[in-house]
Image (cartoon, rainbow, N blue to C red):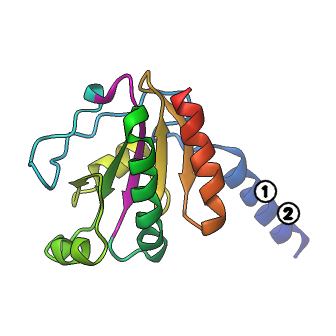
Amino acid sequence: MKVSRLYSGFLVFLFISFEPAWGVQVGEKAPACKKPFLESKQLFDIEAYRGKALLIDFWATWCPPCKRAIPFLNDLRNEFADSGFEIIAVNVDEETQDLDAFLKTYPINYKVLVDAQGDCPKAYGVLGMPSSYFVDKSGKVDFIHIGFRDSDKAEIRARIKKLLE
């Protein structure tokens, strides 16, 4: 019994002590994510956003916190757009046929791209929904935020203001 608890404790230590070997880390250049925007079918090119503060938000229609985050992200995008801030929403639904109906119920005022194959979440190392990657003006990941609660709003807004300085 003692050995089992010791072994379990060691596994927990390993799990929380080491970052995953895949995906982008804070301080690293944000990976390319060449997927089409829903509106224009043009491919997302992260280099086109160099010089802007960028929030890349991975989300899905089946995710309740994602739905709650959309109005707040709309407000942030509108509030900071003139300051050089942009949001890119990466939808990761495997079945995309209901996406248009979802967006009529939960309108998004920023660019949406679709990645049903999951290439972009894999490149970023997304661990949960929603996941937000804050990218600075030089193209490096400054902060990673997983999940969304109303209590996160102040921190998210502060992170954006820091990126815009």
Whole-percent x and y of residue 118? Answer: 28, 55
Where residue 38 sits, quadrant-wise, is bottom left
- Relative to 48, is 144 on the left or the right? right
The amino acid at mark 1 is Phe
Magenta region includes residue 54:
yes
CA gap between label 1 and label 2 equals 6 Å
Q: Which numbered marker is on residue 6?
A: 2
Q: Nearer the viewer, residue 83 or 33?
A: 83
Position above or below: 111 against 161: below
Whole-percent x and y of residue 25? Answer: 53, 36
Whole-percent x and y of residue 84? Answer: 39, 32
Where residue 60 sits, quadrant-wise, is bottom left
Q: Quadrant of the N terminus?
A: bottom right
Task: Answer whether labels 1 and 2 touch (C-beta < 8 Å).
Answer: yes
Rendered residue at 47%/62% (across/down): 72
For label 1, the residue is 10
Q: Which residues are magenta?
A: 49-60
